[in-house]
Image: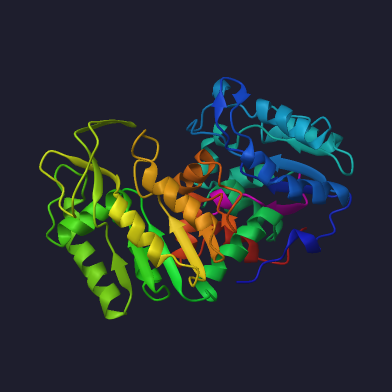
Amino acid sequence: MSYRSVRDLDPKGRVVFLRVDFNVPLDGTSITDDRRIRASLPTIRLLAERGARVLCASHLGRPKGRRVAELSLAPVARRLGELLGREVPFAEDCIGAPAADLAARLGDGKVGLLENLRFHEGETKGDEAFARALAAPADLFVNDAFGAAHRAHASVVGVPKVLGGGWVGLLMEKEIGALTRLVDAPERPYVAILGGAKVSDKIRLIERLTERVDRILVGGAMAYTFLAAAGHPVGASRIEEDRLDLARELAARAAERGVALELPLDHVTAARVEGHAVEDLQTTDGVAIPDGRCGVDIGPRTLEHWRSLLGTDVRTVLWNGPVGLFEAAGAETGTRALAEHLAGLPAFVVLGGGDTAAAARRFGLDDRFDHVSTGGGAALELLSGIDLPGLAALRLGEGGR
């Protein structure tokens, strides 16, 4: 895949519509985690240093086309200003006079932020007229919001269409480089660890991985569907009843291709699970889960075995999805221990998916891996072989107008 990098762009004196992902968690007007803002700082600084007039645009939450005061990006503008060490002017709308006025008063090398794109329903609908309104003040388009690249939204697909294509930002470039390395040229042995809730969410990914990896370790709630499909008792664990045949097909396909599909050998179980609270934790002696009990984590035998499979000879690892209910006290051991083990491997290790990244952050290990993807759904789709709308849009033309 070939895209033009912002590194090769001369934006001096031109207004750059920079699509970023500032969808940060808020407690009132306080940002509780500014990592997504920090992630795009290299691109913002590069553009500013080269004399661009940087018009940042992002979504925040799901206001469903309505103006919701609690989802304003005003606090983000303040935090971005603090991180850049300069004032970042804020437009109270992302289109019309407020956006045009902001673009007009930005000098070369200055940075501004538009109000929440999703305050207009045209954003998520991919409306062409809304895309033209967004693009009106701009000359060039740069996309640094990998987390939104799988959405055919107006700011992601429509704006580059109006402006004749665009460039990838430094964060987007890093994402593409790390993830396509897993697809195009993975060094072997290559092991994938898949967790999370649903087999159905990862059908295409599993199919794709069986063409490339040597081994797949399956944990999390999706493991119980595979175990049930293989005839093992799973107690009250969450399974997808309508996906049992699919699980058998995927296991058979892996076997045909010589890919070892590893399921848990034992489990940490709970008598009751309520949200992120678990009661009466017990560890099974083997693979079977007793009636009335719910699996919430891999057990110690599984962890020991999986560590042995993830030895220093392994060259590439993809981890997508925690292997247990890591938010719950007593059910986080497997996910934490795997994260700690992977952090010490000499392999090229990539974490993909929002929950996996959240687990790594929770355990203070997110800076110990070669790449932690900022885009859950986007990463999953790219690894599954889907051409992301946000990337396809950047190949439309020569860019600029």
Residue at left offset 22%, top offset 62%: 247
User: Which image quadrant: the N terminus?
Assistant: bottom right
Residue 41 percent across, percent down from the top left: 73, 44
Q: Is residue 147 magenta?
A: yes
- Is residue 252 in sight in this rendering? yes
Q: Nearer the viewer, residue 171 or 346?
A: 346
Compared with 247, 325 (above or below) is: above
Compared with 347, 366 (above or below) is: above
> Picture quarter containing residue 7?
bottom right
Whether residue 296 sits left or right of residue 122 in the image: it is left
Whether residue 367 sits left or right of residue 206 in the image: it is right
Residue 293 percent across, percent down from the top left: 16, 39
Residue 388 percent across, percent down from the top left: 52, 60
Residue at left offset 27%, top offset 57%: 264
- Is residue 169 in sight in this rendering? no
What range is drawn magenta here?
137-151
Residue at left offset 17%, top offset 63%: 245
Residue at left offset 67%, top offset 67%: 3
